[in-house]
Image: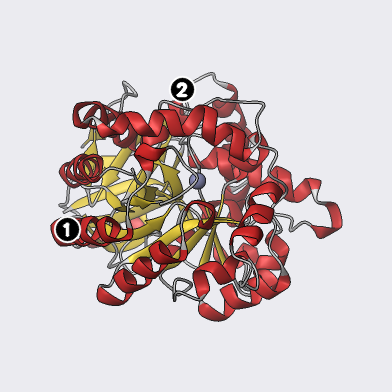
Amino acid sequence: MTLYRATIVDTPRNPFDGDPADALQADQDGGLLVRDGIIIARGTFATLRAAHPREPVTELAGGLLVPGFVDTHVHYPQIRAIGGLGMPLLDWLERCALPEESRLADSAYAAAVADEFLDGLLSCGTTSALVFGSHFPSAMDVLFDGALRRGLNVTSGLVLSDRILRPDLLCSPADAMADSMALIDRWHGRGRLRYAVTPRFSLSTSDEILEVCGELMQGADVMFTSHINENLAEVASVAELFPGSRDYLDTYDKHGLVTARSVLAHNVHASDAELAVLGGNGAFVAHCPTSNSALGSGLFPLRRHVEHGVGVALGSDVGAGTGLFLPKEGLQAYFMQQLLGGDGLPLTPAHLLYLSTAAGATALGIADRVGDFTAGKEFDAVWLRPAAGTTYAVNLASAADIPDALARTFALATSSDVAAVWLRGEQVAVDSGRAVATS
Ligand SMILES: [Zn+2]
């Protein structure tokens, strides 16, 4: 067993239900007892030390120990395509994202991209992710293989499209079924891997492909993910392509794709009717703040989601998003709610930590294993500790209490402050140059 000593903070309760201050659990001099990757006990360091005087102690002095971040929407084939500014969604897809996605047809290219992507997640403290995959089965094999070797919680799937995109990214409904089934057989349930049925969006998928998706969802205990209501031009095109559908959500819902195992990205331009169906069906929405800002997609109506009982978590949406470090998404989400004025939902530090960790675990259906530090869960964690003398360090030292320290962390921390990461109790090498002392 190992006893970790740190300033420990997590959100075992949902701050959107009741007083946000009650959602935060924090110990200034806290302890976590971990055996075989599982948290056995949590409390103050003094209490746990008294009960376990002989166990080795890992001292994590300074900074904050938080649960590993959970990214609920991030595109693996776009890790080399970040920073294409100045375009709305459909232009950006055509000029920046899709040409790069085509290159993953080459397995060697895809393998290099998968390594960059997965190591990028870990170096940003992301330990679980719902990953928007590639259009090529061979590229999915290298992603799953890399995630399995690293011990990451990755849920992902082959991206399906049969119209509008470049021809090399299209597939037939028959191939969509056969290739998805083969990938589910090979990877779903291996280690911490799970499969997600993934039509790119209704714009590029006919009813035939969406019907295949419905059959795949019925045949296995897999997840579903796609895009929805991101951009007004996209919403208008979908309405033209599906004249018989009530709204954008209905294009998925009529094929049985809006369930408690569904995570839909964006939903910036949602109607009340769509929010009612999402809430009623227990589906989740991945809010992607830097992507929505970079593409000018709009200001996310978080308050209306919460009022309709729709669970929301954060996604980086790389490569439209501006990086993999999830606290940056938290800060941008906070900004956007401020800019919405009376329509916004003011976010506290507890909300930001919840949205970056436990909310994502809930959306991915893995909250029984990860997302907070409750005893019995797997020890996936990030130690954020700034280098001495940095503005972040100065502000942590000036913080009045842990919520204040957390607010300053969301304002100031970057991926260079990720001092250590653990996956199921195994410390991952991150390029921080800082060692963890064991006494
Ligand atoms: Zn996306």
Q: Which residue is mark 1?
A: 182
Whether ligand 1 has any atom under 8 Å from the Cβ at mark 2 is answered as no
Q: Position of residue 390 (x, y in %)?
A: 55, 20
Assign a secondary structure to mark 2.
loop
Whether ligand 1 has any atom under 8 Å from the Cβ at mark 1 is answered as no
Neighbours of disc 2 within 10 Å: few (<14), some (14-19), many (20+): some
- Label at residue 387: 2
Query: Residue placed farthest to the right in the image?
Result: 342
- Which residue type carries mark 1? Ala
Res 379 visible = yes
**The quadrant where residue 296 appears:** top right
Q: Nearer the viewer, residue 256 or 390?
A: 256
What's the residue at 36%, 32% (across, down)? 102
Check the picture and name the quadrant holding the N terminus: bottom left
Q: Nearer the viewer, residue 69 or 404?
A: 69
Res 125 visible = no
Query: Residue placed farthest to the bottom in the image?
Result: 280
Q: Position of residue 304 (x, y in %)?
A: 72, 67
**The quadrant where residue 433 appears:** top left
What's the residue at 81%, 59% (across, down)? 343
Assign a secondary structure to mark 1.
helix
- Label at residue 291: none
Q: Position of residue 196 (x, y in %)?
A: 33, 59
Q: Are marks 2 and 1 in contact (CB under 8 Å)?
A: no
Check the picture and name the quadrant holding the C terminus: top left
